[in-house]
Image: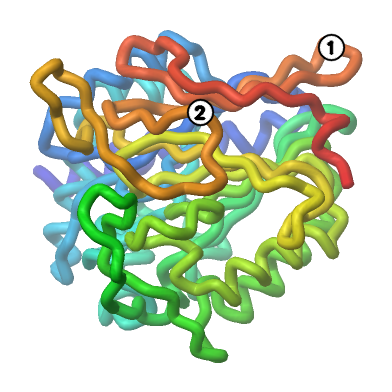
């Protein structure tokens, strides 16, 4: 009975995902996104997300906490997510797309060394409702891209796979002490062969950046800009991080914004376009996490707080449950893009506002 119910849900989700592919003539104006959802805990935040009437929802990883090499257990945990009342309402509202992070991939902080990655990939695609002829069914990695909307109002969504090919993390000692902003356990891996995306996916990304679009939303399961906190991040592989900025710059792709998850906190970061590592215009990244598992130190006043280094941060870090929005006003002469973090009630707590003309080299 459990497997029948799960397969029924997968078929339903497959229909919803299919809707995204036929909505090419309608420009997207409201995209919501988030990460890190404990499948066996209440998820009231879906009420606010659904109330915002998104036209697409993007999962950025840790969509469940699988943490297993047993695919039957992994499937059952996806089933629990599908049965969340709020998530059911979301699926009735809009299609969803997704990438994965370590916990739904299968093992904490894992990369290419995870022995069940091929099997886990098929379970993940079942979760998405991906059809049998989906290219991700036969190639390694779950990276994916799609363009929504008509010419002049196109949004390209690029979801990277930062797990399947990624080299091992390097543990090490940092001389900073508690309260100085270094909270993690990893140090940079500078090995020449170390990779995040793998060569096949790098080539694919370069081709995707040639696809015509006015706005490009690139999703990474963990942070790209923030590079000093010591947890999982692109900064653990500095040569790959620099390569990403170089690829973006050399492609001359316009309209790039980035979204990420993983951290059980939310913040907005910006890389100056004219800096040495810049891409020619400001690169903004919105990190949104977690959908139902807050972090930080809870003070006596009920405020969650932790000191953490991020030289690219704009404003403050938000530690309570949250989700993100990308709102595009196509009616403005110079279309306005609002990148937001919202709390459990749907209140905007962080925002970066820009225009398409500012997202050009």
Q: Earlier in the sequence, mark 1 or mark 2?
A: 2
In this orientation, which residue lies closer to the viewer: 268 or 333?
268
Q: Is residue 128 visible?
A: no
Residue 129 spot, x, y in % from top left: 41, 46
Residue 182 spot, x, y in % from top left: 32, 57
Q: Quadrant of residue 112?
A: bottom left
Residue count near mark 2 (Cα–Cα under 10 Å), binned few <14, some 14–19, many ≥20 = few
Q: Residue at x 47, y 12 (%)?
A: 52
Determine whether, in the image, residue 178 is placed left or right of residue 313: left
Where disc 2 sits, the SS reads: strand
Disc number for residue 315: 2
The residue at the far bottom in this view is 192
Q: Residue at x 35, y 49 (%)?
A: 262
Q: Residue at x 73, y 36 (%)?
A: 155
Determine whether, in the image, residue 255 is placed left or right of residue 40: right
How far apart are labels 1 and 2 at the CA level? Answer: 26 Å
Q: Is residue 358 above or below residue 310?
A: above
């Amino acid at each position: 009975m459990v497997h029948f119910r799960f397969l029924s849900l997968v078929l339903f989700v497959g229909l919803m995902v299919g809707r995204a592919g036929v909505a090419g003539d309608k420009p997207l104006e409201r995209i919501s996104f988030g990460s890190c959802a404990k499948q066996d805990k209440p998820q009231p935040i879906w009420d606010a997300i659904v109330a915002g009437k998104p036209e697409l929802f993007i999962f950025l990883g840790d969509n469940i906490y699988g943490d297993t090499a047993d695919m039957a257990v992994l499937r059952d945990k996806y089933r629990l997510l599908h049965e969340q009342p709020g998530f059911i309402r979301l699926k009735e509202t809009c299609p969803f797309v997704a990438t994965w992070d370590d916990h739904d991939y299968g093992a904490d902080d894992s990369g290419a060394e995870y022995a069940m990655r091929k099997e886990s990939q098929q379970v993940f695609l079942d979760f998405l409702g991906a059809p049998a002829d989906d290219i991700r069914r036969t190639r390694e990695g779950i990276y994916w891209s799609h363009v929504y909307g008509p010419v002049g109002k196109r949004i390209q969504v690029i979801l990277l796979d930062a797990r399947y090919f990624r080299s091992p993390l390097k543990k090490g000692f940092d001389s900073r002490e508690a309260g100085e902003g270094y909270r993690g356990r990893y140090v940079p891996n500078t090995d020449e062969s170390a990779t995040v995306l793998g060569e096949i996916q790098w080539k694919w990304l370069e081709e995707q950046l040639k696809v015509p679009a006015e706005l490009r939303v690139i999703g990474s399961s963990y942070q790209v800009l923030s590079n000093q906190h010591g947890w999982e991040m692109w900064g653990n592989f500095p040569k790959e991080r620099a390569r990403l900025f170089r690829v973006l710059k050399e492609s001359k792709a316009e309209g790039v914004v980035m979204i990420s998850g993983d951290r059980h906190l939310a913040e907005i970061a910006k890389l100056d376009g004219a800096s040495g590592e810049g891409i020619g215009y400001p690169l903004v990244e919105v990190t949104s996490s977690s959908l139902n598992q807050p972090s930080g130190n809870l003070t006596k006043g009920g405020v969650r707080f932790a000191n953490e280094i991020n030289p690219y941060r704009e404003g403050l870090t938000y530690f309570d449950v949250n989700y993100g929005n990308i709102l595009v006003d196509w009616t403005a002469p110079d279309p306005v893009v609002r990148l937001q973090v919202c709390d459990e009630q749907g209140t905007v707590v962080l925002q970066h506002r820009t225009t398409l003309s500012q997202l050009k080299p």
